[in-house]
Amino acid sequence: MKRKAIALLSGGLDSTLAVRMMLDMGIEVEALNFTSPFCTCTGKNSGCKSEAVRVAQEFDIPIKVVHKGVDYLNIVRNPRHGYGKGVNPCVDCRIYLLRKAKEYMLESGADFIITGEVLGQRPMSQRRDTLRVIERESGLEGLLLRPLSAQHFEPTIPEKEGWVDRGRLLAIKGRSRKDLFSLADELDVKNYPCPAGGCLLTELSFVPKVKDVFDHSDELNLRDFRLLKIGRHFRIGDNCKVIIGRNESDNNLLEVARQQEEAAITWLDGNTPVGVIIGTQSDALYSLAAGILLRYTKAEQGASCRIEQRVNGREQVTTVIHNLDESAVEQYLVA
C-alpha cells in the first residue's frame, strides 16, 4: 500500500529537499504552503507562495495555499512560548502550522507529516527541546518526520512501520548550509527558491509597528498588518494614524489599499508623497496629518501650502501652514 505524506512546503531549499527525498522513496506527497502578512518574500508574482507552487508543479504534486487568519494574529499578540529577538513567536507559530497540517492530514487521508526542519538551524524553534515541545503540542508525536535530520531523533511511526527507509534519511545538523547545497546537487534540485526568505516579526525595526497596532486595537484584522509593509506610519490619535509613502511604489500601493472613507492627502504645489489617514477623521487630525506630510516635501518652512484631501469620492483643498520641524514630526513616528 502506497503511503501518503503532507509536506509543509515553504518555497525554500530545505522543504524542497525533504519533499524530493520522500518522492524518491515512493511516498505520495501533497504540499501545504502557509502565508501571512509578515512574510518578507511575498509578492504578486514572486516570493514564497509562488516558489512553493512552482516547486509543486515541478514535482507534479498537489499543493494547497493556506492564509494564516485572525486566529494566528491573536497567537502573535499573546504567544504561550514567548518571543524571539523581535515579536516572533516561532515556537507557537510552528505549533499552529502543524496543528493545521494535522487537520488536513486527517481530512485528506494522509499518513504522516514531513517538514524541512534541520536540528539546530534556527535558534528558537529548531533546538532539540523545542522540537519535542512542538511535536507534542501539535498532537503529532510519532507522525512528524524530519527527513534532513531524522538520524538525530528516535524513529517515527513511518520509520518503524517501514513506510520510509530510515537508512536513507539524513543527519544534517546546525546552521551551515554546506550539506544542504551538496544534497541539492545530488538530488538535482536547481534554482534554490527564496533563499533570503523570512519573517518580518524577527526584524527589530518592524517591532514598533506591530506593537502599535496591538496597543490600539481591541479586535485584530489582517489589513492593519498588511499595511505595515507600506510607507512611514505616524500615530496621531488613539484611533488614528497617517501613513505616508516613501516612494512612488508606496504611493501607488496606498492608493490601491485606501478605503473610500479614508482620506488621501497630497501637496498641490510640488512633488509630493501620498498620505492616507486611517481611523478617526477630524479637522484637527487632518491638519496634523497634512503638517507631517509637508515634512517630506520641499515646501518652505512657514509657507502656506495647499493640501488636497480626497475622501468618499469628494475632493477638497485647504491651506495648511508648514510649521512642523523634524523633531516635532518624529514624536509621532512609529517607524
Image (cartoon, grey):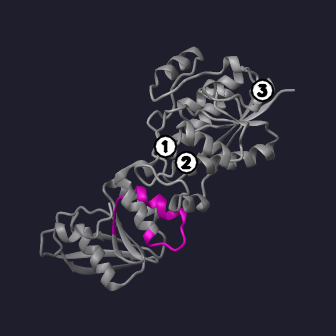
Of mark 3 and mark 2, the one earlier in the sequence is 2
Element under label 1? loop
Q: Which mark is residue 124?
A: 1
Q: Quadrant of the N terminus?
A: top right
| Label 3 – label 2 distance at C-alpha | 27 Å
Q: Quadrant of the C terminus?
A: bottom left
Residue 29's spot in the image, x, y percent?
73, 32
Residue 148's spot in the image, x, y percent?
60, 26
Instruction: Describe residue 161's horizontal placement relative to residue 68 as left or right.
Output: right
- Mark 2: give few (<14), some (14-19) or many (20+) Cα within 10 Å: many
Q: Residue furthest right?
A: 1
- Mark 1: give few (<14), some (14-19) or many (20+) Cα within 10 Å: some
Circles 2 and 1 in contact, beta carbons < 8 Å: yes
Q: Which residue is mark 2?
A: 91
Q: Residue furthest top?
A: 186
Q: Which residue is mark 3?
A: 160
Q: Residue at x 18, y 68 (%)?
A: 327
Which kind of residue does numbered mark 2 sit on?
Answer: Val
Q: Which mark is residue 81?
A: none
Which kind of residue does numbered mark 3 sit on?
Answer: Lys
Of mark 2 and mark 1, the one earlier in the sequence is 2
Circles 1 and 3 in contact, beta carbons < 8 Å: no
Q: Residue at x 67, y 29 (%)?
A: 154
Element under label 2? helix
Image quadrant in which you'd find residue 6: top right
Which kind of residue does numbered mark 1 sit on?
Answer: Met
